[in-house]
Amino acid sequence: MAIFLRMRFEAKLRPVFTVLLSISYALMEFDVDQASNIMWLDGVYLLPLVLLGVWVIVREGKRWQLAVAVAATLIFNWYTGIINCLFTAFWLALELCLANDGQSIKWLVRKVIDYSSGMIIGVLLSAFLFLPNFYALVNGSRSQFDNSLLGIGFVGNPLILFGRLSIFSFSTNDASHTVLYCGSLALLGFVASFFSGRLSKKTRLVIMIATIVVIMMYYWQPLYLLFSLFKKVESYWSRYSYLGIFFIIFGAAKFYSTANEKGLEQQAIWKGVCTLDLLILVGSWYISSLKNGLIMAIIVIVAGGLLSFVDKSAFRAQQMVILSSIACLSFIELGTNMVNGWEGAGNDAQKQSLYHRYVSHQEKQIASIKRGNYRIIQTNNRVGLSKNGLTANYNESLTYNYWSLAGYNSNQSSSQLSFLENLGYRSEGSRMTIVNEPLLGTDTLLGVKYLLASRGTVTTGWKKVSKKVLNGKTVYKNTYALPLAFTARSKASGVKLTGNPFENQNLLFSTLSGSNKKVYTPVSYKSKVAQNYLKYTLLNTNKKKPVYGNLTWQVSEAAQLFVNGHFKSAYTSWLSPSVFNIPVKSSSVTVTLSNVSNPMSISAQFYQLSLANLRSLSRAIKYKSDVRKINISKGKIQVLVVAKKKNECLYLTIPYDNGWKITNNGKRTSASQWLGGG
């Protein structure tokens, strides 16, 4: 940001304001709020360089700077990179309007051409990374456009924005709660620019129109949809609020750069103080945060008073004292806001200590078992389960570098999600797979060899590897697990699946092994239906066999699942699983679902798993396969396998992708997806 301000305003902006406005950008609300989601910050630090490239084109016609900056922002983070690229069109219009002082249409056309070519070059430079991501987006689970997002209305009340310009304002889970707080110095300078007599009427009009456009970016549905990249945004509001804050700081720099030998404009400063305080107080009162508004109003008055004295003193020492006071005010204000924001998010010293401890223990636990090609799942994470027994934190496999069935990705492969759902692991929102408990049959099929299980998890059929407990989790081993590659004579690609994950697994094991044995058998039960709950009493269960339940529902609601009278988790709702473990400790086993609006819409499936048959069938599949080596590294999968009989098929439980190039003994061949996902 300092580079942008220094080059964009050349020698007109005092170094102290360059530094303080740059710090305002660095400690703006967006950065404080996203300090624990640093993937959003790539766009922040690259935006000034991208927009500097736009200015260089308008000023000098040189395209290389824009091209390099655009390539960098797309390479480092394609999501925020696209947002930055969209904003460059707005910035080009702004810079052209500010620079166009009688230039010809030909000049405007040439600048647009230079800008367009610079953008195209930047996109091409990033194509090696951007295009695969774009391809994944188009072919992902959320590629379909939701027509309900179209409209010309507003997504919230723009007046709320003014109430969230004050200190201690933070984004909430509502698209209308965008926060553009970046410190009193930047906000005061921006508002004062509208009253500056040294800025031309045309410049002030351009800034005013641009301000309206920026506000509309967050509240007018077409622009909101555009900058949300045509997807329904359900978290991190607003993901592009840093664009508006950048514009505010730019407007403030415009005002502070007008200070000539006469100094800063006193009248503009105090008009800015009065106007800004009025907007903040009215807006704060409207959203019931008047206390924060009063604090901010006082800070703005103090800042205005200090600014008005900067150029009144003829002595340099006194000027330095005043400028130092302004700097201290900015540091204290922004620092206090930052500390308050981080403490509000739970980032205190105790939480940091717990975080370091968790990371250290998790790394040790994974390192102790990570040898070979297999998958690992766990029943808990650093954040832990919420009070309703659910979580959305499924990406620890990325953090600690192991393969898992769980994952949270904004644009998952729809075939993978469907594949796992057919085997009992439910998907949510077309972006994640819910893995809160082990499903031994599915885990065996998909090569899950180890389980990190927290206390209370049903682990029947899993072998404890070590008594050592780290992060409240113990390591268990699946002795039945199939390798990630195996062979079979039958073709599972033609198998027709049902809505019953247990029968689907039976069918798969039977097809791959050539045996008629079943790993799952139904458990008989009695049901009791009341007005808003269901109670199932399971009969003839066996303590030595894992027992599972699956209640299928049509309507999402806040039901609660109880097993043997103990609360297990929320059910039939966002993030809830489908298949669940049922501990068998006595002859009486009950499953209850409460808070159900329409009990008759729920259907039940209860099955128990034969460990003997699971061992027999998994051994049969392994022994029929002569897979001698599996090597997965550097984007390549190499399998050395010897077919024992003709017409054998090689199965990989690695999700298929259309970009694969497959060779068999050096000759190109093709592959088909079994069950639509493998």
Image (spheres, rainbow, N blue to C red):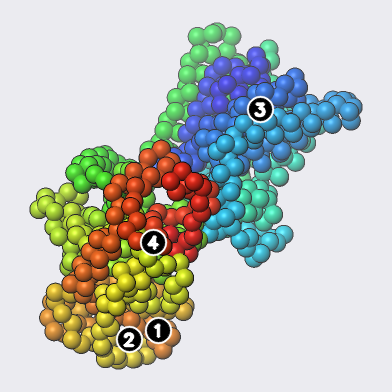
Q: Amino acid at mark 2?
A: Leu
Residue at the image position 66 percent from the left and 20 percent from the top? 9
**Can you see residue 354?**
no
Q: Amino acid at mark 4?
A: Lys
Residue at the image position 65 percent from the left and 14 percent from the top? 11
Q: Earlier in the sequence, mark 2 or mark 3?
A: 3
Residue bearing the label numbered 1:
602
How far is disc 2 from disc 3 in space, using C-alphas? 63 Å
Residue bearing the label numbered 4:
646
Sort mark 4 into few (<14), some (14-19) or many (20+) by Cα contacts within 10 Å: few
How far is disc 1 from disc 2 in space, using C-alphas? 9 Å
Left or right side of 194 for 439? left
Query: What quarter of the picture does the N terminus occupy?
Result: top right
Q: Are marks 1 and 2 in contact (CB under 8 Å)?
A: yes
Q: Nearer the viewer, residue 202 or 662?
A: 662
Residue 619 lies in quadrant: bottom left
Sort mark 3 into few (<14), some (14-19) or many (20+) by Cα contacts within 10 Å: many
Residue bearing the label numbered 3:
66
Q: Earlier in the sequence, mark 1 or mark 3?
A: 3
Q: Earlier in the sequence, mark 4 or mark 2?
A: 2
Q: Are marks 4 and 1 in contact (CB under 8 Å)?
A: no
Residue bearing the label numbered 2:
534
Residue at the image position 28 percent from the left and 86 percent from the top? 535
Placement of 660 over or under 482, stated as above or below = above
